[in-house]
Amino acid sequence: MEPPTMNPVVEPLSWMLGTWLSDPPGSGTFPTLQPFQYLEEVYISHVGQPVLNFSFNAFHPDTRKPMHRECGFIRLKPDTNKVAFVSAQNTGIVEVEEGEVNGQELSITSHSIARISFAKEPHVEQITRKFRLNSEGKLEQTVSMATTTQPMTQHLHITYKKVTP
């Protein structure tokens, strides 16, 4: 079976496609957390629809135990650089982030966040993400967040190397 033809609507995000592995481990920090490191595998694909599919799977760098997980879709508004990022996370958060793609950089901010009724506090109130393809061909992601007790603060930074197209 031949791979599907990429829908031209998602062409501006084609630089994100592939399987990516953290290189080096990512770093996390937040005023209410001890600093930590993590490994992550990212899979971004398409099936010919005007949307990309993604999954982010983080692991503890020493024990390899699963940590954060999220999956979802990245949509572009046709004939614009407007992007929507829809994500469901294993922490019980579901979010919609919106923003723009400019060249090989995607910047998005949460538009809406929903959570399960028993999500632990403090609750996340806003998230921003920036993805960019750096000059070495590596994908970088920076995530910042605000909670009910903390203002917007950088939370995660990670660099990935591409392992499959």
Image (tube, grey):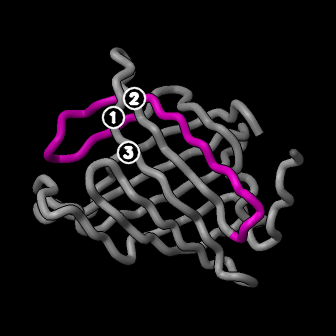
Q: Magenta segment: does it hold 43?
A: yes
What residue lies at 30% left-to-right and 68% top-to-bottom?
A: 126
Q: Magenta segment: does it hold 55?
A: no
Instruction: Determine which residue is flagged by label 3.
Output: 156
Query: Which element carries disc 2, helix, strand or loop?
Result: strand
Q: Sequence-wise, which precedes: disc 2 or disc 1?
A: 2
The answer to whether mark 3 and mark 1 are in CB contact below 8 A is no
The answer to whether mark 2 and mark 3 are in CB contact below 8 A is no
Please tell me whether mark 3 or mark 1 is closer to you in this view.
1
Return the x and y of residue 143 as percentages of the image width and height: 40, 53
What residue lies at 17% left-to-right and 47% top-to-bottom?
A: 31
Q: Sequence-wise, which precedes: disc 3 or disc 1?
A: 1
| Predominant SS along the magenta part | strand
The answer to whether mark 2 and mark 1 are in CB contact below 8 A is yes
Query: In the drawing, does residue 118 fall left or right of residue 110?
Result: left
For disc 2, the neighbor class at 10 Å (few under 14, some 14 to 19, many from 20) is some
What residue lies at 45% left-to-right and 29% top-to-bottom?
A: 39
**Magenta stretch, residue numbers:** 27-50
Instruction: Determine which residue is flagged by label 2.
Output: 59
Q: In which quarter of the image is the N terminus?
A: top right
96 or 138, which is in the foreground?
96
Vertical placement of residue 101 versus 71, above or below:
below
14 or 48, which is in the foreground?
48
Query: Which element carries disc 3, helix, strand or loop?
Result: strand
* Residue with the most extreme front position: 1
Q: Distance between the residues labelled 3 and 1?
A: 14 Å
Q: Distance between the residues labelled 2 and 1?
A: 5 Å
Q: Quadrant of residue 94?
A: bottom left
Amino acid found under the numbered disc labelled 2: Phe
Instruction: Determine which residue is flagged by label 1.
Output: 67
